[in-house]
Amino acid sequence: MPDQALQQMLDRSCWVCFATDEDDRTAEWVRPCRCRGSTKWVHQACLQRWVDEKQRGNSTARVACPQCNAEYLIVFPKLGPVVYVLDLADRLISKACPFAAAGIMVGSIYWTAVTYGAVTVMQVVGHKEGLDVMERADPLFLLIGLPTIPVMLILGKMIRWEDYVLRLWRKYSNKLQILNSIFPGWNCFCCHKRSIQGLLQTAAIFTSGTPQNSKLSGARRSIKL
């Protein structure tokens, strides 16, 4: 029996790196679980490296043997105060970084929208008048109203809201007589929207072609003279 045990120790191989005593005679061997046979031996350094890969930075994660499913009892050395403080700071920073990044991104987008809204107000009303209006307005209204200006402008470009408004008007204007009394002749405008658009396009083309027509008419007059 002692000879058999000695022979097993001489024939031992690491189940992580598959090295034997002949490959590395200075390596430290351990038996961390209930495995038998050739899988019961493993290098101490190989086992530590394998456990680190399984934990993936989480030192509290549980690791078990892949053969017998026995959980490893991992005992860490006592940390000094400096190492403990650094480890605690690293955990806090790793947990707070996603929230901080999201807050910075949301804050940047919000501040950009506020600035764009303020510039839009000053361009529409006037620089001095816009500043006076924003100074007299409620701060809460400015914090809510100014960011909605670029949002509404973007939605106004993306969504064809005027078509939906005209459809609703055509659908319910005959039922609500008060609308006809307030806006007389609006139904005709809704019904002839395409013709009005065509008329406006024709007028734009005619306006853009007016200088050339005036030059041609002037040239004709000079030829006649």
Image (cartoon, rainbow, N blue to C red):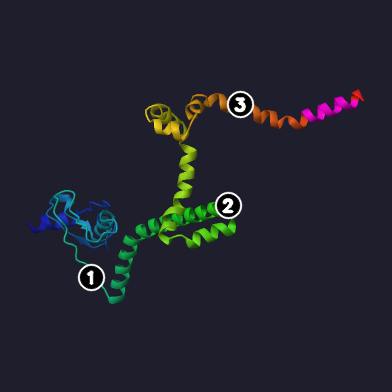
Q: Is residue 164 visible?
A: no
Looking at the image, residue 25 sits to the left or right of residue 104; the answer is: left
Query: Would you identify the image quadrant in which residue 86 lies?
Result: bottom left
Whole-angstrom CA distance, mark 1 to mark 3, is: 87 Å
Quick one: 149 or 38, which is closer to the camera?
149
Q: Is 168 colored magenta in this rendering?
A: no
Identify which residue is drawn at 48% across, 31% down. Answer: 184
Residue 99, how many percent across, how many down? Answer: 35, 58
Going by the numbered disc 3, the residue's amino acid type is Leu
Q: Which residue is mark 3?
A: 199
Going by the numbered disc 2, the residue's amino acid type is Gln
The nearer-to-camera label among 1 and 2 is: 2
Q: Earlier in the sequence, mark 1 or mark 2?
A: 1
Q: Is residue 198 visible?
A: yes
Identify which residue is drawn at 25% across, 52% down. Answer: 16
On screen, residue 159 above or below 78: above
Instruction: Tell me whether the residue at label 2 lies in contact with that at label 3, contact meaning CB atoms closer than 8 angstroms.
Output: no
Residue found at the very far left of the displayed protein = 1
Q: Residues within 10 Å of mark 2 (few under 14, many from 20)?
A: few
Q: Residues within 10 Å of mark 3 (few under 14, many from 20)?
A: few
Residue found at the very far right of the displayed protein = 225
Please tell me whether mark 1 sits on a helix, a strand or a loop. Answer: loop
Whole-angstrom CA distance, mark 2 to mark 3, is: 30 Å
Q: Which residue is mark 2?
A: 123
Quadrant where the image shows the C terminus: top right
Please tell me whether mark 3 sits on a helix, a strand or a loop. Answer: helix
Q: Which residue is mark 1?
A: 77
Quadrant where the image shows the N terminus: bottom left
Instruction: Tell me whether the residue at label 1 lies in contact with that at label 2, contact meaning CB atoms closer than 8 angstroms.
Output: no
Q: Which residues are magenta?
A: 213-222
Q: Earlier in the sequence, mark 1 or mark 3?
A: 1
